[in-house]
Image (spheres, helix red, strand yellow):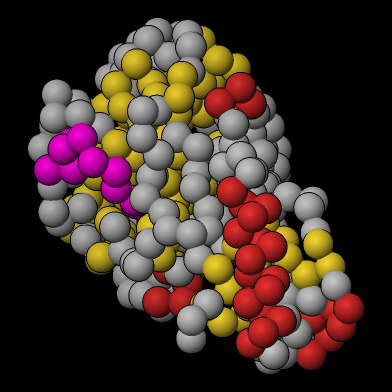
Amino acid sequence: MLDKLSAALVLFLLAAAFSPPIYAQTSFSASGAGGGSIIPGYDSRVCTGAIEGAIRYRGYTPNAINFNGTARLVNTGILTGVSDSKNFTGSAWFRNPATASSEILFITQGSTVELYLASSGAIVISGKNTSGTYILSVQSTTSGYNDGNWHHVMWSFDMSNVARRHLYIDGISSLTVNTYTNAIIDFTDLSYIVGSSDPSSQSLALTGDIADLWINFGTYIDLSSASNRNLFYNSTYGAVNLGTNGSLPLGSTPSIFLSGDTATWLTNKGSGGGFTLTGTLTDSSLDPPSEPVIQYCNGTAWTNWGN
């Protein structure tokens, strides 16, 4: 078995050496007798005896986009399939310089939903009801995230239950609650904006990088569970592959998923609808942290190479 795996690994490394960076699963597959195969990218098959000896490259590097203070993305009109709800979940990578102050990552017109970096470098998330009253206002307990480094934020709220509210920065719980009212958040606003607080001008404009912006309205996930957090962030190597349409964490497509190559990053891979770009999006000079992991199927489970 080990001889076969060693031979397969050599072939795999040769293939990987002459391949471009892998951002998602590719169609390449080198299969041999007995069902073993090598698939650069994410092989989502369940490991069974039928594919024993298969090797997969499980590493994933999100493509990061730079917002230079003059770019914004706007979706005008209610996103497809979105309705007002007490549940709200999201995940994103962000990198902001020390000069960043009160900059918008995501917002709706009327500020019914806000995700932004405060002047202290803390992450703030808020939401209003249809009367325009804040019913959700939380922030990260720690601050200083405008330090020029990559950070990951994930959150999930169920407004009907104070035990079901979570905010994690870089995989660590960091939640300070200012307002948390058992009421419905107004998600059905006129515009959804990335990189600015205004759909028609630059205000609180983002001067930093974003990768894999994943937002799902109407969903709650128990992020106190490590296995659920691992759907979005891995404490060992960072970035996690969410799928080309963001469906890997939950098995369904989220409302918003901005990801992929720079040219098509503004195309919403989620189910809600597209965005219009003002200005120019460029590649970030640095992508979020990730670590390639080579795994093999031992007939019952995917196992990291060397274990």
User: Does the rendering let one see residue 267?
Assistant: yes
The residue depicted at 36 percent of the width and 50 percent of the height is 289
Residue nearer the viewer, 111 or 107: 107
Q: Look at the image and tell me whether residue 128 can be seen.
A: no
Q: Nearer the viewer, residue 49 or 305?
A: 305
For the point 40% across and 35% down, the residue is 210
Residue at x-position 55% and y-position 15%: 277
Q: Nearer the viewer, residue 225 or 127?
A: 225
Q: Is residue 146 magenta?
A: yes
Stretch in magenta: 144-156
**Above or below — where is 244 with respect to 148?**
below
User: Residue 121: x percent and y percent?
Assistant: 16, 39
Q: Residue at x 68, y 32 (%)?
A: 273
Q: Position of residue 97 (x, y in %)?
A: 20, 29
Quadrant of the rendering where the N terminus is positioned: bottom right
Residue 95 to residue 303: above or below: above
On screen, residue 49 versus residue 150, left or right, reads right
Residue 283 coordinates in the image, percent (x, y):
45, 24
The image quarter in which residue 29 lies: bottom right
Q: Position of residue 99 (x, y in %)?
A: 14, 24
How many dots with numbers? 0
Magenta-span inclusion, residue 164: no
- Which residue sits furthest right? 33
